[in-house]
Amino acid sequence: MTKRKVLVWTALLIVCSLSTAWADTTSGTLWYTTYTTQTTAGVSARVWHVDYNFNGTSLVLTNDTGFANPAGSDGLLFSGNNLMVSGQNASGGVVYQYNPTAAPLASPTATTDTNNGSYHLALGPGGTTLYSIWNGSGTGSNTIQGITLSSGGLTSTVTNFTVAGETDIRGIVYDPVNSTWYYGTAGDGLTNGDFGYLTFLGTTITAHPLLTADAAAHGLTFDPFTNDIIFSSGNEVEMYTPGTGVVSTYTSTVGDALDQSSVDGNGHLFVASNNGNLLFIDYAATSQIGTGTAVEKFLKPNLDDLAPLSGAGSSTVPEPTSMLLLGTVLAGVATLRKRIRKA
């Protein structure tokens, strides 16, 4: 076998072995909320961040830090250089804006909604509109609102959308691959909600059910790793492929009340449970959450929502590890080929 063939086979083996090794490890910082004030290390807060490290078998959480203690907190996401936090029923429903690099417990700015509360948040395409969702029964112009953003920050321009087709939308998420908004109606801890897609016409949003009374769709996340929609509620997490249906399901056996989820774009999923558990699933090898490696770890009482780790609403949009790795290996191969030619 020639040196060139040996070189090519060696490079391929390196790619396969390293990508396999890297696929089931991950680390980073996760931002989250609790729906009541919690105290850790003498700091009382509702908005927190914690460092995580998964080594392939176990999940380690460190540097759990209280960041802010607003009157209410629920959904959260990043918009430009800002951290947005929905305020539940506080002051009639508000969205708080924080500087995530400021000192912990810094005072935020806020935009008051005209609905009864602000629970879950979603970022529209292009990052120009922040959607605030009221988790409560009823139709009309107070259940979903669009707050116009300027340079990623809140403004006082709020659009009250009239919602038709559903009476209790709990969360929405945008699918950038299919240019489609999806929604879910499952109540807290319930798995019998509706799931479908939304159409916008002026100030009217119409819901079109795809699954009726059969979806654990309370929290919704778009997964750029598989281009699927992941939704969660009660003790279930489901993976939905547009045009196909539910392709994979994970069922917790420890009495979880799963809420919002977050994916890192590399085959790793986090889901917050209201009983304090943080569910982690590594599905990088199978692309199916039901066959991944699942770890449950207690984080904090009254755990609520997680900020996105990838895509819209995340602080950074990570480049897939495999692409970075492949680029590094190919660059090395090119260098070695030049050396062999000179030899």
Image: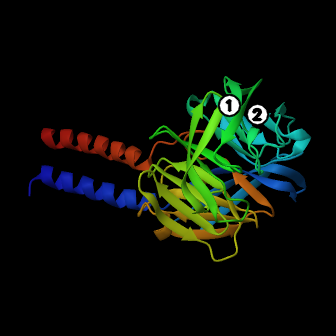
* 267 or 251, nearer to the observer: 251
Would residue 170 appear left or right of 210 to someone viewing this image?
A: right
> Is 324 displayed left or right of 202 in the figure?
left
Residue 57 appears anywhere in the view: no
Marks 2/1 in contact by CB < 8 Å: the verdict is: yes
Which residue is pictured at 89% across the width and 43% down the height? 90
Q: How many numbered circles does the render carry? A: 2
Q: Is residue 315 left or right of residue 289?
A: right
Quickly name the residue at label 2. 99
Which residue position holds label 1?
81
Please name the amino acid that badge 2 sits on: Asn
Residue at (84, 42) in percent of width and height: 116
- The amino acid type of the residue labelled 1 equals Asn
Q: Could you say where residue 329 lies in the image, as x and y percent from the top left?
A: 32, 47
Query: What residue occupies the far left of the structure in this picture?
Result: 1
The x and y percentages for residue 153 are 72, 27
Residue 173 x/y as whole percent? 59, 44
- Mark 2: give few (<14), some (14-19) or many (20+) Cα within 10 Å: some
SS of the residue under disc 1: loop
Q: Residue at x 89, y 52 (%)?
A: 44
Nearest to the observer: residue 99 or residue 228: 228
